[in-house]
Amino acid sequence: MDKLWLILQISLYVVPLVLIGLWLSKSNLTQRSKTFLLIGLPLLYSAHYVSTNALTGWPSTSSMPEDFTLISHHIDEPDKQKGDEGRIYLWINQDDNLVPRSFELAYDKELHQKLVETKSIRTDGQQVQGRQTATSSSSTNKSTGNASLSFSEKKKKAPPAKASSDR
């Protein structure tokens, strides 16, 4: 399904370009204008694809923030029979931002275990603080680069001090 979707997306960009190329071959524009259009259109298409791909609502595969609050997770375990490598999806907030973000990571057994352990913290009504730390070990996740994720109970912030009123 993913390959078919990719082919469809590419064809939606290539077919109009070919049609414009055919139209330009019959037009009276200068050679310089035709060349500019045939080079500029694919650049415009590429920029459009990259910019709108981030707006689709799908989980991001970009690098995660260093510190974040874990809201939830979903784990798709690997399935050797289907050839599925598995994925881990994290729903997080960064810097107490009210808008959560979703991230897709390659499946990692160690990360899976850490996330299972965070469930008890969230069940108790506590928030889970996540941190991405650089590491040189072999237990790194492809999607987080050369980094490891760790989780702990988030410390509650003390309320601001009340101002005393001298009346």
Image (cartoon, rainbow, N blue to C red):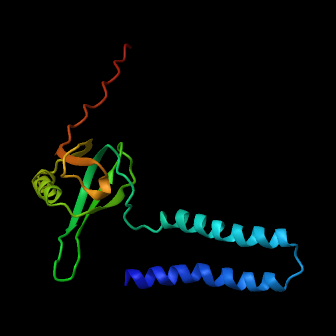
**Residue 119 in view:** yes
Q: Work out whether residue 78 or residue 139 is closer to the camera in this orientation and state it.
A: 139
Q: Is residue 128 visible?
A: no
Say which quadrant the N terminus sits in: bottom left
Q: In this view, does 53 lie to the left or right of 161?
A: right
53 in relation to 121, above or below: below
- x and y percentages locating residue 16 in the rendered image: 66, 82
Name the foreground residue: 42 vs 133: 42
> Residue shown at 19%/51% (left/top)?
138
Closer to the camera in the image, 64 or 135: 135
Name, please, the residue furthest toward the top.
166
Residue farthest front in this picture: 31
Tell me what residue is drawn at x 39 percent, y 56 percent: 62
Residue 48 quadrant? bottom right
Q: In this view, does 89 lie above or below 93?
A: below
- Dividing the image into 4 quarters, which one contains the C terminus? top left
